[in-house]
Amino acid sequence: MTARARLLAGFLALGLLAGPAIAQDAAPAETPQVPDPTAPDPADAEAADDISADIFGGPRRPVDMAYGAFQRGFYLTALELALPRAAERDAAAQTLIAELYAKGLGVGQNLERAASWYQLASDNGDMMASFELALLYQNGQGVARDRQKAADLFRKAAEAGSIEAKYNLALLHVEGVYAEPSLMTAAGLMKEAADAELPEAQYDYGVMLMEGAGVAPNPAEGVRYVALAAEEGLPPAQIDYATMLYLGRGVERDLAGAVEWYRRAADGGNPVAQNRYAKLIAAGEGVERNFEDAAMWRVLARRQGVTDPTLDELLASAPPEAIARAETRARYWPAEPPGEEPAAAEGFTAGPAATGQAIEPVPDGETAAETEPPAPEAGTQGP
C-alpha cells in the first residue's frame, strides 16, 4: 500500500462534539454549581502554573489555583476559580472551562457551550483551544461540519507549535482539498510530528520514507520510524513491523520477532494481529505449535469479523476437545476460565510450518486498514 493510500485511508472523523461560537466580548452566561468544599492546597499553585504552561498554550496569566483544582479532580472548584479569569479574557482559563463542559467533568456535558469557550480561547491565542475547535468543525458534531474552517484552525494551531495540529495538517496536504496538495509539505510536517514522538506520525512518516512519497526513499529509516511507533503501542505499526520482520522486508528476517509483535497487537485486541498470530501458532512457525491457543485466537478474530480459510485448514485436524477448550477460553479472554490453568503446548517445537512452507501472514484480500478500527483522518489528537 502506498503512503498516499495509507494516509487517505485514515480520513474518518474522530474527536469531541461541539456547538456554535459566541461573541468574544461576552463570556457565555453561566452560573456555576456549588463548588467542591475541598479546595486545592495553595502550596500546589506554583506547580500547577508550570504544568498549565505546557498544556494550555497562548498568552495568559497563570491558571494556578484553578488548574490545581482541575488536576486534583475538584472540577466544580476549578470552574468557580476559572470563571472570573475567563471573563477577563484569560485564554487558559477559557480552555479549562471548555474542557470541563466538553467532557462533562463536574458539570453536565454541554458540547455547544464547550465549543463557545474553545472559540473564545482560540481568539485569545490558546493553541490547544484552536486544535480542539478544529476537531469539532472537522467532525461536524455539535456544529455544522466545516472542513475548511477546521483546516484553518489546524494551521493556526500548527503555527503556534501544536504537534497534533501539524500531523493533521500534513494529512490535509496529502488529501489536497482543504489545503494545498503537496506531499513534500506533508512529509515535512509529518517529520516534525514524528520527531516529537507522536506515534501516528512516526508510522505514517515511516511509510512515506519506504515509499518515497514526498521525501527521498529510505527504507531502512522508514522501518526505524515504524518500529518506534510499534514500541509506542500503535497497533497498525505493530502489525506492519511484524510483517516486515516475517518477510525480511527492509530488515533482517526474524521469525521470533515477528511472532512477538503479532502477539503484542493481538493482546491489545486487534483482530488482524489475532488472526495472523493464530496462523503462526497453528503452523508452528517461529513459535511452539499449539492447536488450542491458535483456535482461541481464531475465535477472538472472528468475533470482530476477520475470517481466514488458510487458518481454518491449519486447524482442521485439531482435536475436538482442544477446539472446545479454546472456545471456552475465548469467552473469558483476557482472563482464564475459572479454576483452569493455561493450556500446555501439544509437543511441537518451533520450526517450519506443518505444510512445509512459510505461512504468509496476510491472507489474500486482507489488510490492516480493512479489518481493524479505522485509522484517524485529519481530526485526531494522536495518543
Image: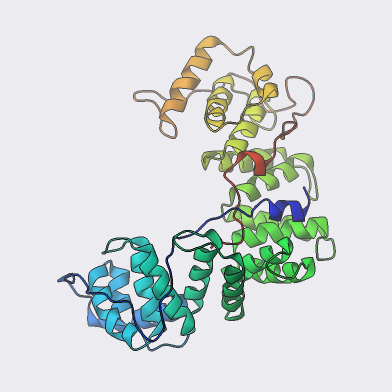
Above or below for 208 versus 148: above
Instruction: Look at 63% across and 66% down and name the residue there.
Output: 167
Instruction: Look at 64% across and 31% down and name the residue there.
Output: 287
Above or below for 61 versus 352: below
Across and down, in percent, residue 168 comes to: 62, 65
Q: Which of the pair 53/296 is nearer the observer?
A: 53
Figure disc tally: 0
Can you tell which quarter of the image residue 359 is in?
top right
Q: Which of the pair 138/321 is nearer the observer?
A: 138
Instruction: Look at 58% across and 39% down and name the residue there.
Output: 263
Taking 265 as reference, is 5 left or right? right
Q: Is residue 49 visible in this depiction of the protein?
A: yes
Instruction: Look at 71% across and 61% down and name the residue there.
Output: 175
Across and down, in percent, residue 318 comes to: 60, 14
Above or below for 380 versus 281: below
Q: Is residue 383 visible in this depiction of the protein?
A: no
Q: Which of the pair 120/143 is nearer the observer?
A: 143
Across and down, in percent, residue 154 comes to: 59, 72
